Amino acid sequence: MARLRSLVLVLVFVGLIPALPAQAAVTVTFYGHEGNRVQNGWLLFPHAFVHLHGTLEGNGLPVDYAVGFTARSPGPQLLLFSDRGILNRPEPVYIADGIAYLSVTISDETYEIIRSRFDYWASAEGGTYNLNTRNCIAFVGDIATVVGLATPSVRTLSPNGFLKDMVRMNPPGSLAGIQHHAVVG
C-alpha cells in the first residue's frame, strides 16, 4: 500500500496525474464609501457597491468584479427628476478606500443569479436611477437579498447607515459563509 501511495505521489508531482482541484469559492463583499470629501479634484459622494472575488468552482475561472449603480449624469437635477442609471466599476484605489462591511461565500449558481441581476440593473427596464428609491443602496440591497441576507425595509440616503443596519440584521453565523469586517457601533 505504501508503494502505491508513493507511486501516485510521484505521478502527481511529474504531472502525469492531475492534482485534485483546489477548493474554489466566490465571495461577495458589500462596501460603503464615505464620500462628502474631495479627492484628486473630485467631490466624492457616499456610495455603496459590491465586489465579487474568488474562483468559480465549476470551471476554475477567476472572478474579480466590483460594481455599483449610479446616475449617468450626477447633479442637482437628481433632487427632482429620475435619470438613466449605469453600472459603474470602481477603480482598485476606490475599492481600497471603501469600507468592507460584510462578505458572504456564494455558490456558482448564486454567482450566475447575481450576474443576471447586474444585467437587469444595466437594462432599459431596470436602469432608472432615482436618488430616493433606485440608487446605489437599492442596488446593494437587491444583491444582498439574492445572497440571502436580511436587509432594512426602510431605505435611507446613507449607504454606510444602510450597510451598518444590514450587518446588525445578519449577525455572525446567521448565514453560511458570512464574515463581518467593519465594526458597527
Image (cartoon, grey):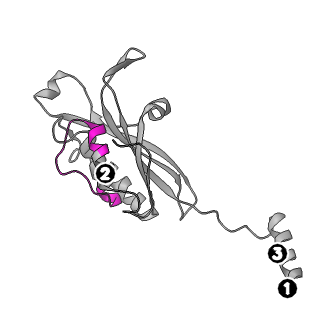
Q: Earlier in the sequence, mark 2 or mark 3?
A: 3
Q: Secondary structure under badge 1?
A: loop
Which residue is found at the position 33% from the left and 27% from the top?
Answer: 35
Q: Amino acid at mark 3?
A: Val
Residue that mark 2 sits on: 168
Q: Secondary structure under badge 3?
A: helix
Q: CA distance from mark 2 to mark 3?
A: 49 Å
Q: Residues within 10 Å of mark 3 (few under 14, many from 20)?
A: few
Question: In front here: 127 or 35?
Answer: 35
Q: Position of residue 153 (x, y in %)?
A: 18, 51
Q: CA distance from mark 1 to mark 2?
A: 53 Å
Query: Quick check: 178 left or right of 165?
Result: right
Q: Earlier in the sequence, mark 1 or mark 2?
A: 1
Numbered mark located on residue 8 in the image = 3
Q: Position of residue 60 (x, y in %)?
A: 58, 59
Residue range (magenta): 145-164
Q: Residues within 10 Å of mark 1 (few under 14, many from 20)?
A: few
Question: In front here: 36 or 168?
Answer: 168
Q: Which numbered mark, 1 or 2, is in the foreground of this view?
A: 2
Residue that mark 1 sits on: 1
Q: CA distance from mark 1 to mark 3?
A: 11 Å
Q: Amino acid at mark 1?
A: Met
Answer whether labels 1 and 2 touch (C-beta < 8 Å): no
Q: Which numbered mark, 1 or 3, is in the foreground of this view?
A: 1
Q: Earlier in the sequence, mark 1 or mark 3?
A: 1
Which residue is found at the position 56% from the left and 62% from the top?
Answer: 59
In the rendered image, which quarter contains the N terminus? bottom right
